[in-house]
Amino acid sequence: MNRSYFSIVCRNSKEYFKKSSWRGILEQVIALLLALSLVGEVIITKILFDNISNITSFQKIAKNLILLISVIILQQLLSGFGQYLLSRVSYTNMGKFMVEFQLKLSRFPLIYFENTEFLDKVTKAKECLEYESLGHFASICLKMITHYSVYLLAIAGFLIYTSPLLVIILLLSFIPAILAQIIKGKYYIDLENAIASEKRRCDSYKKSIISTSSYKETRILGAYHYFFNIFNDSLHILTEKRWKIEKKTAFLEIGINSLIFIGLGISMYILFSQMMTGQISIGMFSALFVTLSDLFDIMDEMISYNIGQGSEVIGQVASFYDLMDMEEVEEDCINPNFNEGIVAKNIFFKYPSRSSDALSDVSLNINKGETVAIVGENGSGKSTFVNNLIGLYNPYKGLLKIGGIEHKGNLSRGNFKNISAVFQDFQKYKLTLAENVIISDIGKLENFELISTLLKQVGFYHPSAKLTTVLSPEFSGIDLSIGQWQRLAIARGLYRSFDFIILDEPTASIDPIEESKIFENFENIVANRTAIIITHRMASAKFADRIIVMDKGRIVECGSHEDLLKNKGKYYTMWQAQAKWYQDY
């Protein structure tokens, strides 16, 4: 989405100010008072030097001097308190923006997260929040209105009263500088779009080097230098792209600073000439001499620092609002009734940015209380099919009804409340043992008796593990073997209240004998409830009422274990290849 510099400024300032409450209002009031105090300093300086040049009474000069010192002290107090409020408001607002961002992500269909362009937007939006770009940029924009604009208008009026030519010179000096910063902003917006994918690659390589989840394998395999080299290459690409932009902006800055310096010199010459010809008093000259120096410093701060800094982060800010303005799928809040089962008729599904279908003309009816196993080789479409059957993905063609609800990509979180799952890439939460189970149904009252029963049923055992034990050495707890973690994940899925459960390779890290025990208990647990088992292991599949065999995104066989063995098709071939694993059965 293309946005103008001005529209981004207005949008961000409005959103930031809405979230700031009274502290944000106070921050802008202080900025306004600080601007007025700077104008007051100019006026008091003029009066003070006029009194000194006219040799007025010492008492009058002292009063003016005390007043000037008081204004300067007030400026320091206002500036310090303003900086405190800026940090406080910015930090608080970032929390509010982060909450909105997380809620927005939760409302996007899961298929979005398979799209590279969408992931690039998420990366840029996260950086915008993590670096507090939104807050600083909005504060700069608001300060332009309440501080800089008030000060500059007042000083411009003062200068017009003295010499209109000075105002013209200032405008000729600074208008090109402002335009240059807007051009810089365009450069940085383009840069953020160009490097988003490379940033994600760079972060991925860095995690392979330093992440606790991968350092064991990286070190054992001696792959540290490999990942370091590709991380370094990726970082070099990012640096090169950023350096090209920095060179362009550096030349802009040099040209602009030259104009500003020339403008300052001409203004000082005009001011000195007017004093020597008697057009202005010594007091006016002194006040304007200091004012012009301060004015050029303030203009440099406003343009080179504030607008310049804004130009650098505006790309991130634009990306954040691009993501926040993305259309959400309207949710259908009807609860599924799994007494009506699941119906898939001639469905087709394709992942974003891929030319071929992941599912092609797939049809399947699953009845209430039926346990269906889906088997097939890697890449055959098993997990993709199940993600469609539970509403995480949406087929682009065909009919899909989940618990009587026709799925058109609009299922709400409420639609999943009667569904439980144990996925192959289950999470290892750094929580207590009990919390790792309860997390699947936090609305249910903690039932420690049920937790202990489920852990026993899935064969979970660790000599040091109590329900209150934290499962993370990082937090002075313990770690589990991958097999015990998998048992824990199964218990977590079974703890949740459900009418329909999906088990995606639920026993991949458990030996065949223990696997058999788990599934014997599993038959009792899921009695009268619908279940789908995705597995590579044929022994896991034979517990099912019906077995679906998939190949290249299609269903190629369907039937019971015995029937499929008699057919001597793909299932029979797979069973024979694994028969040596199950010779004890």
Image: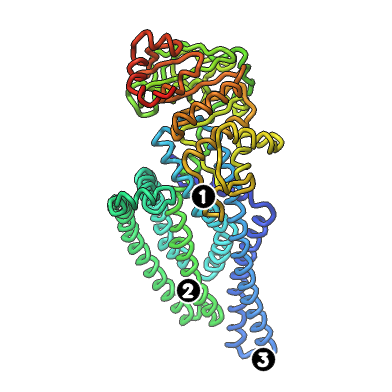
Compare marks 2 and 3 and give the one earlier in the sequence: 3
The local secondary structure at tag 1 comes to: helix
Quadrant housing residue 76: bottom right
Q: Is residue 441 left or right of residue 363?
A: right
Q: Amino acid at mark 2?
A: Ser
Compute the Cα span from label 1 to label 2.
Answer: 36 Å
Q: Position of residue 109 (x, y in %)?
A: 51, 29
Q: Crowdedness of circle 1 by 10 Å Cα count: few (<14), some, many (20+)?
A: many
Given residues 545 and 422, the one toward you in this image is 545
Image location (x, y in percent) of residue 150 = 58, 61
Residue picked out by circle 3: 58
In the image, taking residue 201 as reference, residue 332 lies left or right, namely right
- Which residue in the protein does label 1 denote? 129
> Which amino acid type corresponds to the residue marked 3 in the rendered image?
Phe
Q: Residue 171's spot in the image, x, y percent?
A: 44, 61
Residue at x 68%, y 38% (from the top left corner): 448
